[in-house]
Image (tube, rainbow, N blue to C red):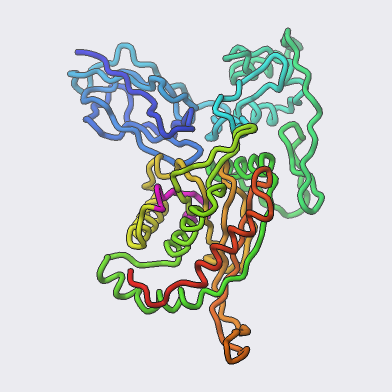
Amino acid sequence: MSLVDLIMPKLGESIMEATILKWHKQAGDKVAMDETVLDIATDKVDSEVPSTAEGVIEAILFNENDVVPIGTVIAKIKVGATAGQPAATAAPVAPKKEYEEAKVVEEIPYQPSAAPAPLASSNGVRFYSPLVLNIAQSEGISMSELEQLPGSGQDGRVSKKDILAYVANRSNGNMPVRQETVSQPAAVPIMTAGNEPIPVGNQAPAVFQGNVEIVEMDRMRKLIAKHMVDSKRTSPHVTSFAECDVTNLVLWRERVKKEFEKREGEKITFTPLFIEAIVKNIKKYPMMSSSVDGDRIIIKKDLNIGMATALPSGNLIVPVIKNADQLNLVGLTKQVNGLANAARNNKLKPDDTMGGTFTLTNVGTFGSIMGTPIINQPQVAIMAVGAIKKRPMVIETPQGDTIGIRHMMYISLSYDHRIIDGGLGSTFLNAVSKELENFDPNRSF
């Protein structure tokens, strides 16, 4: 009999770690090849990890809610063993913790450069895991106290064991002090548009009075919140708007949708039509499909279009249509429907949310006529389409102006002002608008 390592799989180019959500197998359980052993989560998507061998689970090396680096051995499988045999070297799963592990990735700000940011620095800001920060807040430990704690983790990081030992020693009057102190600059509050401060990590928790209900964010909502704040800190956002007459497009879809579904087995929505117009114009303005790396602009030749999709929980996820410029309308429709259904049924694969170069969000789905979306880092632009409304409009004809009922829609583009100025942003937006307005009502699909 031999032991086979079960490795935390690589889940995408930029993913460096994953959280263990649930173990489906325990030490001593029999497992078949490709049978699901555990569920994991990244900041993009939840996923299942299958067994890479047939045998018996010999050891479970991490607990649920642990954050594990990619490539780490997470379990051992004894090949040729039968179920029920004692697992001599199996590491017992630790009992339920007093503090539940945070189901989020480390609070490391987004860095556009390829090199990962160090976890701790002797002459810079010290980083803490969400679990450590949660314990510190619960125990009333200030950031200045936290900075003085000696850490036993990698690069001097404070672990759960370190902070719990500090809490115990503090009650006895024995408080360990970090030998190498780090100067922590005072936190500067970030102001909202209404001049209200956004809370930062070292501020005391707010105290609310009156009749309130406090709801804890779920894991995905915490990640969304982090990404949105990181994006606003990273990119100076500018948003431009355009009004678009989509009458021809609406009438064409209404005319062909039954035949399209009968022939292709798919319902055609407006989304693939919008994506078609976007990719045609990114070809003309390639800067819209790029990212920023320090003083370098990385122009992405593969046009991978993300589409923001609402989940039943109310959260959003952005599956990506790879090489969208190489697909015809039927291909785009199949991709859009397939990814949307997979997202709503929690069937997305990790790769389905990776590699996006431009994002489309349809705020009109929820009744909004326009929106100012936040850029999906490390992209530099995101387009929002609003609800399509019938309105009386002035129509210019060779015989003179007239009033007619038209299907109108507002579209908006938020872009990174570091590399995209108002001229380019507005030109691209208007080009997409004209593409939709000049839609051929007699085209085939």
Foreground residue, 297 or 272?
Answer: 297
Q: Residue 35 vs residue 92: left or right?
A: left
Q: At x 43% / y 22%, what residue is drawn?
A: 62
Q: In the figure, 297 relative to 417: above or below?
A: above
The picture places residue 360, in percent across and down from the top left corner, at 52, 56
Residue 323 is a magenta residue: yes
The picture places residue 276, in percent across and down from the top left corner, at 44, 60
The image quarter in which residue 397 lies: bottom right
- Total marks shown come to 0
Q: At x 62% / y 83%, what residue is drawn?
A: 393
Q: Residue furthest front?
A: 398
Q: In the figure, 229 relative to 277: above or below?
A: above
The magenta segment:
308-325
The picture places residue 338, in percent across and down from the top left corner, at 35, 55
Q: At x 31% / y 71%, what residue is drawn?
A: 260
Q: Residue furthest bottom?
A: 399
Residue 280 is a magenta residue: no
Foreground residue, 327 or 212?
Answer: 327
Is residue 421 visible in this depiction of the protein? yes
Foreground residue, 325 or 350?
Answer: 325
- Quadrant location of the N terminus in the rendered image: top left
Foreground residue, 408 or 123?
Answer: 408
- Quadrant location of the C terminus in the rendered image: bottom left
The picture places residue 311, in percent across and down from the top left corner, at 47, 54
Is residue 171 visible in this depiction of the protein? no
Q: At x 39% / y 57%, what residue is drawn?
A: 336
Q: Residue 335 vs residue 188: left or right?
A: left
